[in-house]
Image (tube, rainbow, N blue to C red):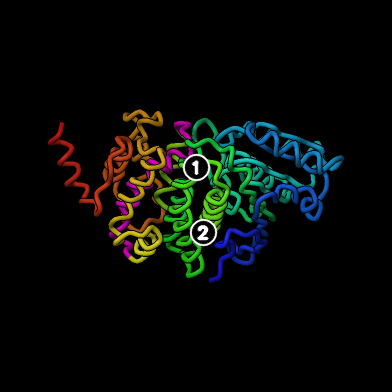
Amino acid sequence: MNLPGRDGQPFTYPAAVFGDNAVRVIFGRGSLAQVPSEARTLGSRVMIISGRHEADAAAAVSAGLGDDLVARIPDVVQHVPVDVAVRAVDAARVAEVGLVISIGGGSATGLAKVVARDTGLPILAVPTTYAGSEMTPIWGQTDHGEKTTGRDPRVLPRLVVYDPVLTISMPADLTAASGMNALAHALESLYAPDATTRSSEVAEEAIRALADGLPKVVARPDDLDARTAALRGAWLAGWALGSTTMGLQHKLAHVLAGKYQLPHAGVHSALLPQVAAFNAAAVPVPFARAARAMGLGGPDEVGAAMFELATQLHAPTSLGELGLDDDAIPGVAKIIGASPVPNPRDYTEEQVVVLLEQAYLGTKPQRLMAPFDKLRAQKRERN
């Protein structure tokens, strides 16, 4: 499969996410300038949804739209609370909006998706982080700490404009966590039960681009070549995720982030090494692809390598450091056990407890994770 962008040059590409649904992708430095003209090909009477940190980009797009801009939401909230979503949908209807433009990370994209789900409006997305949500038909929102997600083709953006320049101002801690979040997307897609040859090639290339680009971006934040490579990896990771079914990694992240208001990307970063180590032995072929992409010796090294990469990037490796109380772990495990999701390795409630304990402490997983009863015995001995 000939994936564009390996040479760092701008491109336009129709990415088939699922079935006949394709997202038109415009990728390249300075491509933000194309947003007003591209928006007019999709609709008129535009609403812009943006994050606080994207004020300058939103202002530039607003100036280009002129009178076609009829509504603005200049601030967003993590995890898309229901009351925030209701107000946004009402504003879109009152203003008779014909197109939604999201500019920002997963929170901006997520709010735009809920508006699209309830109104049928098309979305033009301009990502400024590595969240990847812009390439999926997945929506999510929270209500009193409970996160609900779903898949709906109406929320898949028609057009995504990736401008690496917009990621330069992303703080180092967000760059690191968001990059690990993207790696979680790619790895879980690689071993998803409905993975295809195409999605697996996309996911492997995503892991390769991210593993190579992220350390360079964190070390040299203004390195535009590295920023371009990392953003391309995030695009591919989101595309792979949008084409496949989410499993234990994402179920855990949604419960933890939604119920306890933890940062979504940081939670993925802390969980990824542990979930990878847990699953690797059950699906050695997909993990061998991940190992190849990361330059490792074999599939059993992936979990530990993800931990080492997160440590190198100063990305979160501990749920405890993100603010989770260890008393919450049994309750989270009970929720996960009561609503099983597709995963290559079967799991029990007790196994989820131990996995979460490892992620809570931020311990480096073994190259080939030992049976959980052995880990539990070791823990009891230490206590």
Relative side of 96 to 300, left or right: right
What type is the residue that disc 1 sits on? Arg
User: For the image shown, how many numbered marks are present on the structure?
Assistant: 2
Residue 381, numbered circle: none
Would you identify the image quadrant in which residue 310 lies?
A: top left
Residue denoted by label 2: 240
Range of magenta residues: 260-284
Relative side of 106 to 56, left or right: left
Residue reaching furthest to the left: 381
Relative side of 193 to 348, left or right: right
Residue denoted by label 1: 220
Q: Nearer the viewer, residue 13 or 382?
A: 13
**Any magenta on residue 195?**
no
**Any magenta on residue 282?**
yes
Q: Residue at x 36, y 39 (%)?
A: 317
Q: Nearer the viewer, residue 53 or 145?
A: 53
- Image spot of residue 124 (x, y percent): 70, 50
Q: Residue at x 36, y 41 (%)?
A: 311
